[in-house]
Amino acid sequence: MSTRGTSSDNGGFRYLAVAEMLQKNIESGEYGIGAKLPSERFLAQELKVSYLTVRQGVDVLVRKGLVRRELGSGTYVNASKADPIIGILFGPSMVEESAHFYRALLKALEVEIAGMSYTCRSYDGFNRADAKKVEEALPYQQLLRDSQSHPVQGFIKVSLNDELWSQLKPLKGVPSASHGAMSKDIIIDGSYFGARTLEYCVKRGCRDIVYLRNFPSNQQEDLGGLGDMAKKLKVPMPEIINIYEDGQPLDLLAHDIVARATEQWRRAKRRPDALIVSDDIATRGAAIALIKAGIKVPEEMVLVSFANEGIEHHYGLEVARYYLSPRELAVKLVSILKKRMKREKADVPQIITGGWKEEPPAKKEKKRVNLAC
């Protein structure tokens, strides 16, 4: 450690000489990024100055953003004077037309992170990358550049392929919170959606109900909620139709499934009283298919959707919407990250149930439509 320039007596400003010496040692690389400085008592002995003088000198570097004090641990060199950042990593691409939810979630996360006095940086499209060549992907390159010029304090991962995350080796060890099909931090409890939407349909006089679902295969809570409510209300279990994504847009898949179903209903001369759809994008395709088939909603069929609060799609017909709040998800993700950044144990999983903004009014029981004519 170089101590040149600290032996002269500059009166009450000797601490500035200490600060200048430490800054030069940082800039020369003697104390690298993330390095722990010697204790202030050790420096005082080495520099032959008082403990208070060293502390005041280190205070200067803290105000400049060159170092940070961590209570009970020590003083560490920051990556730069640049603002520390929280990185938001999205698996899907934000430019996709169907990424409404992710864009709404990003806005909510930006608000929450701003309240932590950090800069929010988002990176999307990771899931498009080849897992074996992820380091060549544009979002990874952007993230790597930012991490070299800004101290990265944490990450929030949203629908990010776990295999890809395991390849981001330079980012290992940074605290993170995640939301996605395989995440154990946040669980969207579909049992409430299943139970409440079925209850609503029955209140509308519906008994013959079809459920179009695209929950991940490892999530069955919605089916459990449906089954429990069906037993409670003594109505038949809805017919389940799963949407298996195969690279096509979700609304097109739902449209084709419902279009085939309407043709089957026409030939059977009987159609269901209600259609529940577990995704708002899928609901758009389903609605178009119902309109093409000439089915009047809600007079002849009730249509219910799992929707995202603050994102209002226009379907061309009446849809009862059970909402999931992107803001609630953002608050829970940031609360988990805060705990982990403090090296504290986070209370996980956090459960999100969703709900009606205002429960749609139940109408009188409608007569079953006879398709024989």
Image: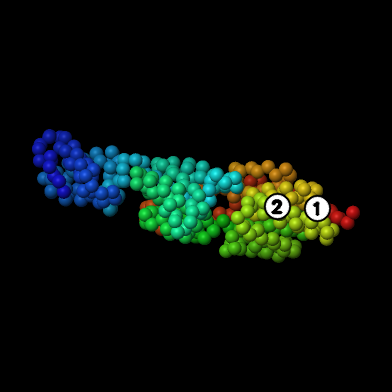
Q: Secondary structure at mark 1?
A: loop
The one nearer the camera, 217 or 189, is 217
Residue hosting label 1: 365
Q: Position of residue 274 (x, y in %)?
A: 75, 54
Q: Label 1, label 2: how many angstroms apart (C-alpha)?
A: 28 Å
The one nearer the camera, 280 or 48, is 280
**First in sequence: mark 1 or mark 2?**
2
Q: Position of residue 290 (x, y in %)?
A: 76, 50
Q: Secondary structure at mark 2?
A: helix
Residue hosting label 2: 255
Q: Inspect the image, locate mark 1, and give the three-letter code of the amino acid beneath it.
A: Glu
Res 279 seen here: no
271 shown above or below 106? below
Q: Residue at x 62, y 57 (%)?
A: 245
298 shown above or below 184? above
Residue 222 occupies quadrant: bottom right
Q: Position of residue 276 (x, y in %)?
A: 70, 55
